[in-house]
Image (cartoon, rainbow, N blue to C red):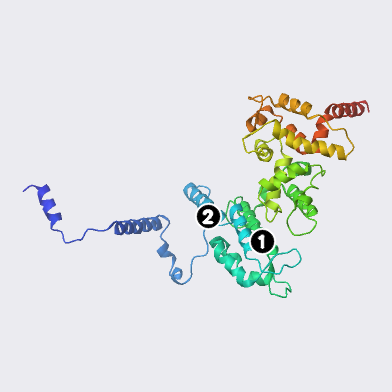
Amino acid sequence: MDWKQALKSRLGVSSDPKRSDQEVKDEEMELFTKYYLEWKGGRKSAGTSYVNIPRFYYRLPAEDEILLQKLREESRAVFLQRKSRELLDNEELQNLWFLLDEHQTPPMMGDEAMINYENFLKVGEKAGSKCKQFFTAKIFAKLLHNDPYGRISIMQFFNYVMRKVWLYQTRIGLSLYDVAGQGYLRESLRDEELSKESQETNWFSAPSALRVYGQYLNLDKDHNGMLSKEELSRYGTGTLTNIFLDRVFQECLTYDGEMDYKTYLDFVLALENRKEPAALQYIFKLLDIENKGYLNVFSLNYFFRAIQEQMKIHGQDPVSFQDVKDEIFDMVKPKDPYKISLQDLINSSQGDTVTSILIDLNGFWTYENREVLVANDNDSTTDLLDT
């Protein structure tokens, strides 16, 4: 018998049972842990205090420990992604609002819908696991304010939930800049050379954020944390048309016909950056009243009629729609002479002008008087040079 046959027969009569896949994985993990700890310097020799006191200090990887740095960065990114997925998204917030509205407890307190503790708990059970943290006795008691029936305001509770979600989103966003993962941002992250003017033009700077939030608070006349269509109509110069505002509240996420701060941010970001493709996409969706993916003569006329009505209110002679329509098609030069697509607007580099003509009286007036404004600017420049 040769050695191969002897080996096979020996293995065949072996009394050791065949190991399962799980046992093989356990052994593999045990060996990996053993060799990893030996490579790290032998943790067992560090002392027996680990048995009683859990480890609380983790040394940051040195600059030359590339592998450990990459591992730390990847684990932090995965952790933040997981935390972000735990937050309520727009659809879940809207579902929560519908549930609260369905379970309101009569009678109403003025115009405010109320909910008692029993229905509050019912909503918590139906809303899902992400909402569980908000449906506690402690939060209910915080929002309870001398209601004779022991109820809380649905709107106040919903605002509380939204603000908590915004807070968590902000913390996760800031954590992306915390490279060391120690819970604070370093001074080196600030650009001391950045001028005040540059910060104000940067949409994501602190001064710009304060400006936008201040505008939101000023528009919120009833101080309920939300904006109605009437309150939003005072945005900017107050010359956005009612038809356009109607479309905003039809297409954007609202709660009981009012807009929250996050939706307001999207709205402002689009209107203040109308040259950008993303902003044009936002506005185009509002202008596309038939959801056909393009604007035709009917769409343009639908929105421009509101501009003509505003001109009459201000004592101005309405401009002919035919003239404006021809100018718009001449500016955009669409592939199809009867339809204007989003890509046509972007390619023309005139999307900001076209949208301003259709939704904002002030924007239309600026376009109509562009030659006069340019002449005035030239005169002012000449005067400065002469002095």
- All told, the count of numbered labels is 2
Q: Is residue 247 above or below residue 372?
A: below
For marks 2 and 1 on the same chain, the one whose residue lies earlier in the sequence: 2
Report the residue that reaches farthest toward the front.
298
Residue 199 position (above or below residue 367): below
Q: Point out residue 182 in the picture as x, y percentages from the top left corner.
A: 59, 57
User: Where is residue 143 drawn, in percent x and y?
Assistant: 69, 69
Q: Is residue 311 left or right of residue 149?
A: right
In front of the other: 53 or 321: 321
SS type, badge 1? helix
Check disc 1 and report the residue beneath it: 158
Compared to residue 280, the image places residue 55 above or below, namely below
Q: CA distance from mark 2 to mark 1?
A: 24 Å
- Give how far across and how far down residue 120 sits, in percent: 62, 68
Residue plotted at (68% across, 49% down): 263
**Visible residue check, residue 18:** yes
Q: Position of residue 286 (x, y in %)?
A: 68, 41
| Residue at x 80%, y 37% (from the top left corner) | 307
Are the residues at dot 2 and dot 1 in contact (C-beta closer than 8 Å)?
A: no
**269 or 115: nearer the eye?**
115
Q: Left or right: where does residue 335 sit relative to residue 356?
A: left
**Image quarter hosting the C terminus:** top right
Write down the quadrant of residue 23 in the picture. bottom left
| Amino acid at the residue labelled 2 | Arg
Residue appearing at x 16%, y 61% in the figure: 15
Label 2 SS: helix
Numbered mark located on residue 82 in the image: 2
Residue at the image position 48 percent from the left and 50 percent from the top = 71
Q: Residues within 10 Å of mark 2 (few under 14, many from 20)?
A: few
Identified by mark 1, the residue type is: Phe
Q: Is residue 193 something one can see in this rendering? A: no
Q: Nearer the viewer, residue 198 or 311?
A: 311
